[in-house]
Amino acid sequence: MNIPFVKMHGIGNDFILLKRQDFPNASQDQKLAEMICQRHFGIGADGMMVAEASEKADVKMLYYNADGSQGEMCGNGIRCFAHYVLAEKLVPEKSVLRIQTLLDVREVEIQSHEPEGSRVKVYMGKPEVRSLELSITLDGEEIKLADLTVGVPHAVLLEPLLSIHRVETLGPRIERLDHFPQGTNVNFAKVHDRSHVSVMTWERGAGHTLACGTGICSVCSVLHQKGMVEDRISVIAEGGQLSIEIDENSGIYMIGPGEMIARGNFTGKDF
């Protein structure tokens, strides 16, 4: 079968988006995600999202990682999803959308909307911090990390220097530590000053990605609780920049783009 799709990215975090009516067999979502996200034999992406009707919001977002596992929410993904459902006229055109995820219903504000992409502000909720100073030992190195949830689980390491080697070496090992029975995303952060931070991420179920929205929010939350940053932070990931706003009473807000890459049809010969 031919499955219409759109490919988008949020600061380098790339996704395949499709409608439930174009792929009615929801029981095969995970298999499709694994196939369609494969970078050599599929289209290639960090994850896949399916738009469905919702009884409690404007629209429902189902998110799958590249390995086929289902995620509760995706920060960069939900910005792309907001643009997609507006562009495809799956929701009425308005400035604030309510998007149902497996986690909860998220309100997203469309700050600008053009054919090539949108700028979106997303309320990311309040973080649930389990530890700001968890100590682990790997290969004789004592590593201090924060353990928290911003929609999905995250570990945050503060680093004097950021390197791909360290992300790809430590990331998969920390992701699968016994301490994290459901796995965790692993974020490596460097503070430049009180308003500027750089982040690199190893994502649960996707590996080393160019950006992670919930990961960036988790980093900013940890740094804010440690008194190291202001309420508004500019964060540079490998794929681009996000703005984060922190309100001690209401939680975290993420502002950034969702940008179009391509549209086409996936030939799903196994469906």
Image: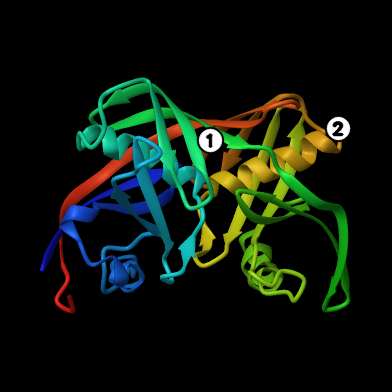
Q: Is residue 76 left or right of residue 127?
A: left
Q: Is residue 217 visible?
A: yes
Q: Which residue in the protein does label 1 denote?
A: 241
Q: Secondary structure at mark 1?
A: strand
Say whether disc 1 or disc 2 marks the residue closer to the N-terminus: 2
| Res 16 label | none
Camera-nearest residue between 132 and 198: 132
Q: Within 10 Å of the Cα at label 2, are there few (<14), some (14-19), or many (20+) other Cα atoms?
A: few
Camera-nearest residue between 204 and 202: 204
Q: Quadrant of residue 68?
A: bottom left
Q: Nearer the viewer, mark 1 or mark 2?
A: 2
The N terminus appears in which quarter of the rendering? Answer: bottom left
Q: Is residue 190 left or right of residue 217?
A: right
Q: Residue at x 39, y 54 (%)?
A: 62
- Where is residue 29 shown, x and y percent of the image? 32, 67
Q: Is residue 97 left or right of residue 229?
A: left
Inter-mark Cα distance, 1 to 2: 22 Å
Type of the residue with mark 2: Gly
Q: Residue at x 71, y 69 (%)?
A: 180
Residue positioned most to the front: 55
The C terminus appears in which quarter of the rendering? Answer: bottom left
Q: Secondary structure at mark 2?
A: loop
Type of the residue with mark 1: Gln
- Where is residue 229 shown, x and y percent of the image? 78, 30
Where 231 falls versus 258 (above or below)? above
Camera-nearest residue between 14 and 128: 128
Q: Which residue in the protein does label 2 denote?
A: 227
Q: Residue at x 20, y 62 (%)?
A: 24
Where 28 falls versus 251 (above or below)? below
